[in-house]
Amino acid sequence: MTSAQFDIQLVAVMTAAACALPGSFLILRKMGMMTDAISHAILPGIVVGFFLTENLSSPFLVIAAAATGVLTVFLVEVIRDTKLVKEDAAIGLVFPALFSIGVVLISRFAGDVHLDADVVLLGELAFAPFDRMMLFGADVGPRGLYVSGGVFLLSAAFIGAFYKELKCSTFDPALAAALGLAPGLLHYGLMSVVSMTAVAAFDVVGSILVVAMFVGPPAAAYLLTDRLPVMLGGSVGIGAACAIAGYWVAHVLDVSIAGSMAGCIGVAFGLTFLFSPERGIVASWRRRRRQKWVFAAQMLLVHLFHHEDTPEEAIENRSRHLQEHFGWTADAAEKTVDYADERDWLTVEDERLRLTSSGRDEARRVLRRGTGGARAQAPVGSMAHASARRVAEPA
């Protein structure tokens, strides 16, 4: 691996880490697309910065762009707080308005200048090793590494200093306000960090990858854990792994680095979305399927318990009678009996279904939980029939 390849991966990993920390709070606050809005709305800030400095390379253009990002968040919040429109509509109203102001200013006052968001914000990772930071005449590494490292430290310091306050205001803003934690001030502080990070990351890796790094890794981590510290660490880890994997995929296939990294983030989220142990699609499907059989077996136990030691037991508690009684298919009835038998809830003797002591206890527990006391005795049969039919038929 050459030094240039190492520099590219190092810059990408640091940028992914910088985006992942505030991105986690954006995901938890359901504001993931705010970064996309900021990317469109910062143009007037760049134009104003150019008018003041008349220098396309001035760092003030980036500062003005970040300030416009904060203004974007403020205007979205103001419109949303009126309760007249939803937040997505507020975002859709604000960033086209600000973007159009930037376009009008350019066409009216800077038509002969090549000035747009790309001038200061369209980075390219492939060029990162050639844009060097010089300190006292010495080359100290790629400039993008220091830019990304700076915003990463800024994000880490802000989150570390206000961790408890951010956590409380994110999950329960009303409680945070009652405790005097100033959730509104924290929100704008977080949005300022988001805006600064977004603008700095745009300059390093480009607009496509920034939105992916802000949203993808935190969203994947969110599906893997319920603990905020683990989510923050997981977001950084997933983002870094996708950055490295994306680089080597791009190297092998000879394609865009940013596009490859964004693709790897999408693949990582897709795999997590499908196979997350608790919240993944596969796990949810297996859990729903298991719950159907559990519910069907419990209804069977209630039915057997209801007719146990009665004159109807010889007919009602026969396996062959279940299809007629519950409306199950033969396969569903057989699987339900097998499921209950495997859990030692009943025994089968010449098609006669007999509750075991544990099955009888389970039936009583279901009755106490589901309908309660004596009231359960009368409607339990019809309840079991209707519910069990709905549950078991699709299986």
Image: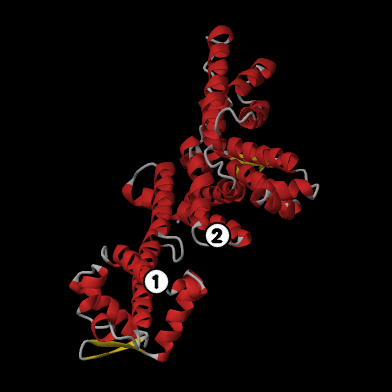
Distance from Cα at disc 1 to Cα at disc 2: 48 Å
Kind of element beneath mark 2:
helix
The spot of residue 357 in percent (x, y) is 42, 91
Q: Which image quadrant for residue 271?
A: bottom left
Callout count: 2
The residue identified by callout 1 is 380
Taking 171 as reference, is 193 above or below it? Answer: above
Residue at x 42%, y 85% (from the top left corner): 360
Mark 2 nearby-residue class (10 Å; few <14, some 14–19, many ≥20):
many
Determine if residue 229 is in view: yes
1 vs 2, front mark: 1
At horizontal 69% and vertical 41% (from top left) the residue drawn is: 187
Residue found at x 54% / y 12%: 104
Q: Amino acid at mark 1?
A: Val
Question: What label does residue 234 carry, if any?
Answer: 2
User: Is residue 289 in view from this perspective?
Assistant: no
